[in-house]
């Protein structure tokens, strides 16, 4: 009997996740590249500040386009946005690999950052929207898993290429491979179906039906996952770029927006990019003096992170997002405080046992991050948003994530040069603060559909004390209103959209509140895919 092929939604998720592989590859290779003697022969010796700027520039360049990416994805489609970002990134990688001076190299990193800001921000949205509820955590965790694999590939590529003596090909080869990876993602984007949820929000029934068929959803599964009342009630709205951002901070969406911003920002402020970008420097500072030894240690840490990512990725839908956030944060902060204490006590020496404690602790930090925060952060920030603002909200949050990435990558070499323990204490304190906030304000989303998750944010526990008092007062003073028909959440959403977009008022009010034309077309879906 022939083995059953993978469902279309899994293949599409794997294809898009190549973006995570590319991102991780850059993260794993750039720190090693700039520490190669062959790179210094071409570009000259860089100060710690210039090292931080060169490495982090790709993150700084990604801040603004990641915010714009939400508007782009809402108006032109998720796949189109990913494709545009990938092409831009490919051009930037090509400029870096062919640079004969630092100015061209910096221009290349800037252009690559512009593209990365677009495709990374949209990638998580696309995967979340095409995934069935039962496996959304696993599929949405694919980019992080692929990113970890990319880090591993980047470290070992540099470990091998550094042996190309007396040639700039030692540092150019990693960028040649990066261009080839980008070309593979471009090819995938051209073939991918559009997100059915995006097509539904545009009122494009033929495109929705085509996407559902190509993604291999059965009739029953499509009805349950995509065509519920919550999914079909959302309207297409004509918002400008700034309106699409402003709506995120209105009362109906403010809590979810702020939570997504906090999660993606603070996950990066744990210091993970400092560990990943500058792993060779961290190991060298701990006592591994040679370049090859520090590169090898970085590669070993990447292999361990990849190994722990496999069970973390497969169990993403078994272990709650909240549990992952709290336990992971406690572990990360504890390790940072331990390393910082050893450096503060001047206990780390090339021949002492403390250096091995630091090296092992760096390994453990990467393992805990990949098993918890690395998987949880992007999944949670994406899935808590309603469909019609998901792209915009996720992209704004990703923009903050890019900024905090830049901040960490910029200050880490400077802090390590001036006072090593200060960097570890800073990141440890921020991780502990994150645990406290998420423990108080983070509702669980595991095992719930994207539409059902929205109801969690109407729970009184997420409202301020003032809001609750006002709500109680209204209920006490207007008891007679209980006899009226309650307003549904979809009606409330429509009312909000009408206030925001008067130009769409006629089209919105003409829509029948009971008609479900998308549901009717689900009857044409094939039914050969079993439903778990």
Image (cartoon, rainbow, N blue to C red):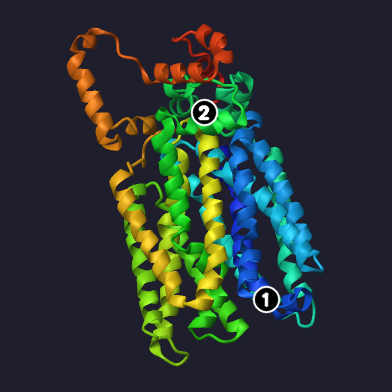
Between 103 and 220, the one nearer to me in the picture: 103
Q: Which residue is mark 2?
A: 388
Seen in the image, is 488 located left or right of residue 85? left
Q: From the top left corner, tell me how far across and down residue 15 is, in percent.
A: 62, 46
Viewer-side label of 1, 2? 2
Which quadrant does the C terminus fall into? top left
Q: Which residue is mark 1?
A: 160
Query: Can residue 326 be seen in this snapshot?
Result: yes
In the picture, the disc for residue 498 is: none
At x 50%, y 8%, the residue is 509
Label 2 neighbour load within 10 Å: few <14, some 14-19, many 20+: some
Seen in the image, is 100 located left or right of residue 54? right
Between 316 and 468, the one nearer to me in the picture: 468
Q: Is residue 459 above or below residue 512?
A: below
Seen in the image, is 263 located left or right of residue 85? left
Q: Helix, strand, or loop for circle 1? A: helix
At x 48%, y 63%, the residue is 272
Q: Earlier in the sequence, mark 1 or mark 2?
A: 1
| Distance from Cα at disc 1 to Cα at disc 2 | 46 Å
């Amino acid at each position: 009997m022939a083995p059953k092929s993978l469902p279309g939604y899994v293949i599409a998720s794997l294809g898009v996740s190549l973006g995570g592989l590319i991102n991780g590859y850059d993260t794993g290779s750039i720190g090693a590249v700039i520490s190669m003697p062959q790179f210094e022969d071409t570009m000259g010796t860089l100060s710690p500040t210039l090292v931080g700027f060169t490495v982090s520039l790709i993150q700084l360049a990604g801040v603004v386009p990641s915010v714009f990416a939400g508007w782009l994805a809402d108006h032109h489609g998720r796949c189109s946005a990913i494709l545009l970002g990938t092409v831009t990134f490919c051009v930037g990688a090509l400029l870096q690999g062919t640079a004969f001076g630092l100015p061209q190299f910096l221009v290349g990193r800037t252009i690559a950052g512009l593209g990365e800001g677009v495709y990374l921000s949209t990638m998580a949205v696309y995967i979340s929207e095409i995934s069935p509820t039962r496996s959304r955590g696993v599929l949405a965790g694919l980019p992080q898993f692929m990113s970890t694999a990319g880090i591993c590939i980047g470290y070992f590529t540099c470990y091998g290429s550094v042996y190309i003596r007396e040639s700039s090909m030692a540092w150019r080869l990693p960028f040649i491979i990066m261009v080839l990876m980008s070309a593979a993602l471009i090819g995938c984007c051209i073939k991918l179906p559009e997100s059915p949820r995006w097509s539904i929000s545009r009122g494009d029934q033929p495109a929705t039906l085509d996407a559902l068929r190509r993604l291999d959803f059965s009739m029953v599964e499509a009805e349950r996952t995509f065509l519920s009342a919550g999914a079909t009630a959302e309207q297409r709205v004509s918002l400008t770029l700034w309106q699409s951002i402003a709506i995120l901070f209105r009362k109906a969406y403010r809590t979810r927006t702020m939570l997504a911003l906090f999660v993606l920002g603070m996950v990066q402020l744990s210091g993970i990019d400092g560990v990943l970008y500058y792993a060779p420097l961290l190991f060298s500072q701990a006592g591994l003096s040679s370049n090859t030894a520090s590169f090898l240690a970085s590669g070993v840490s990447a292999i361990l992170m990849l190994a722990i990512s496999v069970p973390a990725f497969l169990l993403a839908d078994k272990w709650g997002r909240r549990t992952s956030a709290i336990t992971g944060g406690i572990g990360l902060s504890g390790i940072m405080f331990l390393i910082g204490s050893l450096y503060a006590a001047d206990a780390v020496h090339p021949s002492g046992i403390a250096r091995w404690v630091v090296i092992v602790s760096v390994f453990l930090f990467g393992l805990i991050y990949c098993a918890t925060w690395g998987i949880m952060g992007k999944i949670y920030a994406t899935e808590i948003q309603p469909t019609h603002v998901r792209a915009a909200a996720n992209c704004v949050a990703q923009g903050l994530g890019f900024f905090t990435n830049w901040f960490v990558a910029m200050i880490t070499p400077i802090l390590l040069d001036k006072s090593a323990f200060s960097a570890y204490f800073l990141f440890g304190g921020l991780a502990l603060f994150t645990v406290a906030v998420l423990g108080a304000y983070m509702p669980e989303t595991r095992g719930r559909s994207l539409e059902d998750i929205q109801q969690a944010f109407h729970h009184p526990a997420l409202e301020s004390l003032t809001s609750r008092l006002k709500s109680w007062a209204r209920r006490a003073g207007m008891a007679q209103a209980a006899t009226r028909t309650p307003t549904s959440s979809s009606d409330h959403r429509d009312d909000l959209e009408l206030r925001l977009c008067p130009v769409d008022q006629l089209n919105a009010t003409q829509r029948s509140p009971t008609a479900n034309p998308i549901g009717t077309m689900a009857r044409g879906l094939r039914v050969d895919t079993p439903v778990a």
